[in-house]
Amino acid sequence: MLTCFGKKNIRLTILTYTLKILLIDRPDGTYCFRLHNDRVYYMSERILKLATNISRDKLVSVGTCFGKFTKTQKFRLHITALDFLAPYAKFKVWVKPGSEQSFLYGNHIMKSGLGRITENTAQYQGVVVYSMADVPLGFGVAAKTTQECRMVDPMSIVVFHQADIGEYIRSEDTLT
Amino acid sequence: MGRKLDPTVKVKRGPGRKARKQKGAETELSKFLVDDDGPKKLSSRSRKRAIKRAQVTKEPKQEEKSKKGFSDENSKWLKPTQRKRKIEQSEEDEDSDSQWEEEDDDDEEGFGKKEMEEEEDDDDEDMVDDYGADEGDEQDSDGEELLPIERAARKQKKQIRKKPGSDDDEDEEEEDDDDEEDEKDDLKEDEEEEEDTVQANFDETETFKLPAAADRAKEGLLQMDLQTIHQRIRDNVDVLSHFSEKREEGKERSEYLSLLRSDLCTYYSYNEFLISKLMDIFPVSELIDFLEANEIQRPVTIRTNTLKTRRRDLAQALINRGVNLDPLGKWSKVGLVIYDSSVPIGATPEYLSGQYMLQGASSFLPVMALSPQEGESVLDMSAAPGGKTTYMAQLMRNTGMIVANDANADRLKSVVGNIHRLGVTNAVICNYDGRQFPKVMGGFDRVLLDAPCSGTGVISKDPGVKTGKDEADVLRSAHLQKELILSAIDSVNADSPTGGYLVYCTCSIMVEENEWVVDYALKKRNVKLVPTGLDFGKEGFIRFKERRFHPSLKLSRRFYPHSQNMDGFFVAKLKKLSNTIPTAPRETEDEVESTKTETAASSEQIQKPESKQQKPASTPEKSNMGKKQKLKPEKSETPIITKKAGVKSENKKSDGPKKAKIAKLDGETSKKSAKPNKKQKVKELNGDSTKEVVIEKKKGSQFEKNNKTKRKNLLKKNKNRMGKNKFKKLKNMVGQ
């Protein structure tokens, strides 16, 4: 179901967020990615087998949706993948409590709201955004390197917003 | 001026200088504040008047006071304890009732003893506003000129009020909770406008009188205010609870009930149908509680997502955000009830990160009853919005598999959202009509069916149900639920090592949608009811009006908003005993031997030769088989195709076509079971009793799509091959 081209695309995206894919072979069984209706789902092989009974037009979702391919075949990572990618994130950004709500509404993170950031973050590096209580809030892209973040003024953007958990309420319809 | 109010300060008296000084505030005030407790010093005239009054009113006073149950001397200071519900405690005398009303008025008005005196005076047929002693004083103080005139006027007033006054007095006694002012207003209104109806209602102290038909018609034209209706409802319920004592002579219970019905419809805005149904289900006093409970919202409850957090930690985090909460109850380890919150509960970062889910308390119950185990395969037939599905997933710790199905594609989006938010990884979401289910996929360990219903248990959430539902809606729901429950039963694998359970639940309190549907399932399939594991809630009905249900329905549970403080709900847990589906009621050898399964085109032909072998074969059985065939002509071919292999193998093993029927529909288990079944069948052919056959049948093979297997067997027997035009061939077979 998943073409080679597709897989490559995903891997490219995912690698920007994580060190390596630790998600295929897991202690509790083999998991896999499958493409269905332009969306990529991550599920265990057991569920895959059982889901084949359901006809394609009636199947809405299997396992967890990681993201989707847009019309131009770009891969967009969804917030639903957060739980899986967050533990493997190499580069993290912590947001101050005051700016937490702003990020959850879909805004970018400014220097004033930046709590911590991992060292040696390159520019335009994919990062996972956490709250100060280490609760993962979403994905982002670093706008500046760590060094630059130290020097820049408080009102400039340091992390571009990509996905946040507020989308569960804001865009519930588009999750599927 | 500046002196403090101090009762312990001694006032100087006497001719001295100190006595002439200004006394403190307390002494000045004491001149104005009259001590009501002490008996007033009456002038000679007022004394005479008091004597006269006492003579006139002695007799009625005694009558009424004897009713009240307290002696005359003690009535002033001895007050009966206030009851919370007049209706429940109205088992005591009406006298005590009336006294309670008086006392209630006292408390509400804060008039203290004055009111009591007034009430008593009213009993004595004095005016409501009769401040007896004070009048006398006022008269004296006003001057002698006014006395005779005032007297005459008062006498006149008293005379006028005496006649309707007795009713009014009763009125006051009966209308306990109303403010006295309202009573007075009502009295005036009553006198002017509604003398007929209200007086008729409150003619005597003890009996609530039904208004005559003409009066009721009048009411339709007049605007009856809600308070009067409410009072009338209460009185009516009171009478109905103690019918033999309080009934009016010549009036039937049905008349009281019909009046109550129309009053309830008006007061609570229900339609006649629903009120009649509710009156059948609940006793009258409980009905009022139920209707009242439907007017207010149930408390907001949340369920901790144990996949991501613990209840303690979540409670702590929410309290830090400013939420006032408590554990839900002893019966739940994951529930929290929210009293109030400074932040929106549905938008906290904890909610967004999936640490909890907003869910009604009653929705916990079916999942707790089902209790899915780790590694099982579970089906949720009506999953939207996904609360129960995610609860099952957390109980299964993300192992096994859950199929979440819903017929409505829009509502499925919320299922997807919730599943992803709460971190459920073992779920497959699909969009089928629940009735298609055993065809799509079967052999689940457990199935949860939260059937779509009329919603009479969640009126507090959706007041539109009050007027929107009628007979046709309920029957339509019931029909759909019956189809769904049969499909659900067929989707369960009876031979599952850990399961074989189905939980059927609805958020409705109608018997047609609950007990009737479960009873239907008991008749149509090899299932039995088992205890739900919920130790609270009301037991299901075994009989209702003219219907009688299977006694095991006692194991099902009903929940009500007024007694358990959760939405109205019904939960029943069924265990599937065997995968065979019984055909129309008959227990003959032929049927048993010939068809372990229900109808099938092939079965007829197969059975014919068999029936010849077996002497007890009877024509009715054959006709039954014929009927069975006709009953299920629509069975699709797909199961036949899939079962081909199994059928073939079994065919070789089996003696007759019937054994071929043991063709398994899916899984290895059926094969295993088929083998012992076949052996048993052989025994049967040797001529066991029908009963044994029946038993064996129950133990017998499993398969979910009986028609197809039968057909398959038939075909196999005849041709051992399914050509391209299977359907036509099958049709021909059936025709023959």
Image: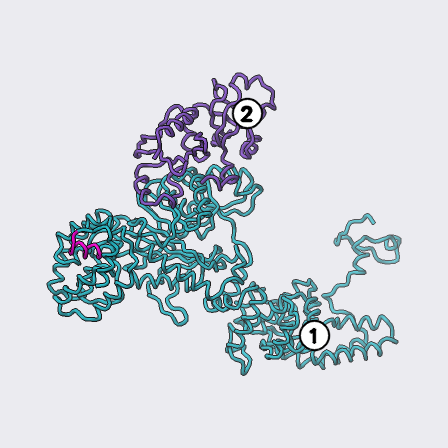
**Of residues B630 and A90, the one drawn nearer to the viewer in this rendering:** B630
Secondary structure under tag 2 reads strand
Residue at x 12%, y 57% (from the top left corner): B655
Q: Residue B181: image x %, image y %? A: 70, 66
Along the viewing direction, whichever of A19 and B264 lies nearer the viewer: A19
**The disc labelled 2 sits on which kind of residue?**
Leu
Whole-angstrom CA distance, mark 2 to mark 1, is 75 Å
The residue under label 2 is: A114
Q: Nearer the viewer, residue B451 or A65?
A: A65
At which x and y percent is residue B448?
Answer: 36, 52
Quarter of the rendering containing residue B84: bottom right
Q: Which residue is mark 1?
A: B193
Q: Residue furthest left?
A: B686
Mark yes or no: residue B427 visible.
Answer: yes
Pointer 2 and pointer 1: residues touching (CB < 8 Å)? no
Residue B459, numbered circle: none
Q: Position of residue B303 (x, y in %)?
A: 45, 45
Q: Is residue B320 above or below residue B726?
A: above
Q: Colour of chain A?
A: purple
Tag 1: amino acid: Glu
Give the magenta-colored segment's residue range.
B710-720
* Chain appearing in cyan on the rendered image: B
Q: Quadrant of residue B526?
A: bottom left
Circle 1: element type: loop
On whether residue B154 falls in the magenta region, the answer is: no
The main secondary structure of the magenta stretch is helix
The x and y percentages for residue A104 are 53, 34
Chain ID of residue with mark 1: B
